[in-house]
Amino acid sequence: MLSPVVTEKSEQLVQLDAGEPAAVTQTPLFGLDAEALTARMVAAGEPAFRGKQLAEGMYRQRLTALEELTTLPKALRQRLALGGWEVGRPRIAQVFKSVDGTERYLIECRGGDAQTVEAVWMPEGDEGESGDGTEMDEAQEAGKSWTRATICVSSQVGCAVNCQFCLTAKLGLQRNLTAGEIAGQVIAILDRHAVEVGRDRVNLVFMGMGEPFLNFDNFMAAVRLLVKEAGLSPQRMTVSTSGIVPGIERFAQEPAEVRPKLAISLNAPNDEVRSELMPINRKWPIEAVMDAVRQVRLRSRERITFEYVLLGGVTDQVKHAREVARLVRRSGLPAKVNLIAWNPGPGIAYDQPQAGDVEAFRLTLLDAGIPAYLRKSRGRDIFAACGQLKRTVEG
Ligand code: SAH
Ligand code: SF4
């Protein structure tokens, strides 16, 4: 998807020695995988291994400037710069720190225009994502204030899906993010926290702004970059969708070595309520979503996550929990339910659920044999919690 611009620039790269001054707008190398980088290096008359070196420099060493890529000869770095290339990794432009350790970032993408994207760092992870306890017993990492963490990643600026309870929906869809912009959020945050890939326990959740399955190609290209070039495990990644059936069907075709885990935003006990809260349900109702999800070949012990936002009085009653339990059981899927108490936002007229109702809901699911976790609300004070991402600049 980056190819139109890149092709043009790679031609320039062949004739780099023209001695032209660097173009005002540089083209990012970040976002290209080792194969694409290799092709560009070969086209420029360089040995093929330079592509691999570039990929390692950007995605493993997390370097951000051509001058830092010292595995490449200085002359080549200069030729690249003159040819209009730069590393061009998305940059953390602003940080909001929550009292609970959560950090929300405004990340500036290419061109430095006003369109920033949001991502969130949650140290100690999010109990909702890994609340099955399997990740709790890792040894404390010396010198780090966290033992594990979760990064929440955006896939679009804004969102077109228009769920009635979600603040991101208010933005509408501004634009899709490129693969480099999606993966760049992760690499920039790993860098900021000196994460050692392969040693530190970091989970990725594609649950920030946007609907990943309405930007499917870029989303999956970003996952491949993160897995193949940066060395992250897809089994530590979860993508959440509002139920875009064609997207789920394509996702089901992805090979296991690059397929993240799947979460479905169920959010309602039946089609009637769901269609009101999530208009997308009129196009793809619950059964159509379940049919698509059943096409995914799960790994051993893998479960589908159903996310369920509890709206006070609307979806949080015991009778709703019973319906949800029936629905999940009927699906025949190995599943767990992540409950999320609704986070309020300006201009959205719902109520937060009462603590007692939340607990009664969870116990009803557990009694019915459905694993159910309450996702801790993180970073609400900095507008970092679920459904609150809206490029809010006021801290
Ligand atoms: N667009 C995707 C992923 C981003 S939303 C999706 O909808 O699945 C991530 C999760 O946050 C979804 O499960 C969504 O239902 C939930 N969410 C949205 N707004 C929320 C709010 N105000 N409070 C709590 N959860 C919310
Ligand atoms: Fe979009 Fe997800 Fe928000 Fe719905 S909940 S509007 S799909 S970001």
Image (cartoon, rainbow, N blue to C red):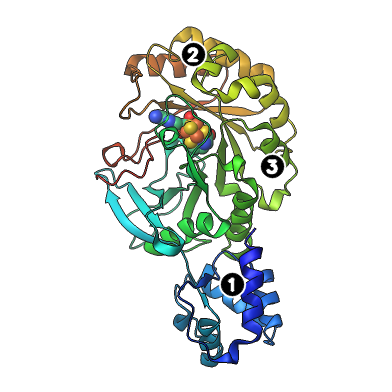
Q: Secondary structure at mark 2?
A: helix
Disc number for residue 27? none
Q: Secondary structure at mark 3?
A: helix
**How would you rate the neighbour count of disc 3 (Cα within 10 Å): few for under 14, some for 14-19, many for 20 or more?**
many
Answer above or below: position of 23 versus 159: below
Q: Mark 2 = which residue? A: 364
Instruction: Compare residues 185 and 204 and report the one nearer the observer.
Output: 185
Q: Quadrant of the C terminus?
A: top left
Q: Are marks 3 and 2 in contact (CB under 8 Å)?
A: no
Of the image marks 2 and 1, the number of the one nearer the N terminus: 1
Q: Position of residue 122 (x, y in %)?
A: 38, 46
Answer above or below: position of 283 versus 53: above
Q: Position of residue 353 (x, y in %)?
A: 35, 18
Instruction: Compare residues 138 and 188 and report the one nearer the observer.
Output: 188
Disc number for residue 55? 1
Image quadrant assignment for residue 280: top right
Disc number for residue 251? 3
Residue at image point 45% right, 83% down: 67
Residue at image point 46% right, 56% down: 185
Residue at image point 66% right, 78% down: 11
Asked if one can make out residue 299 in the rendered structure from this viewpoint, the answer is no
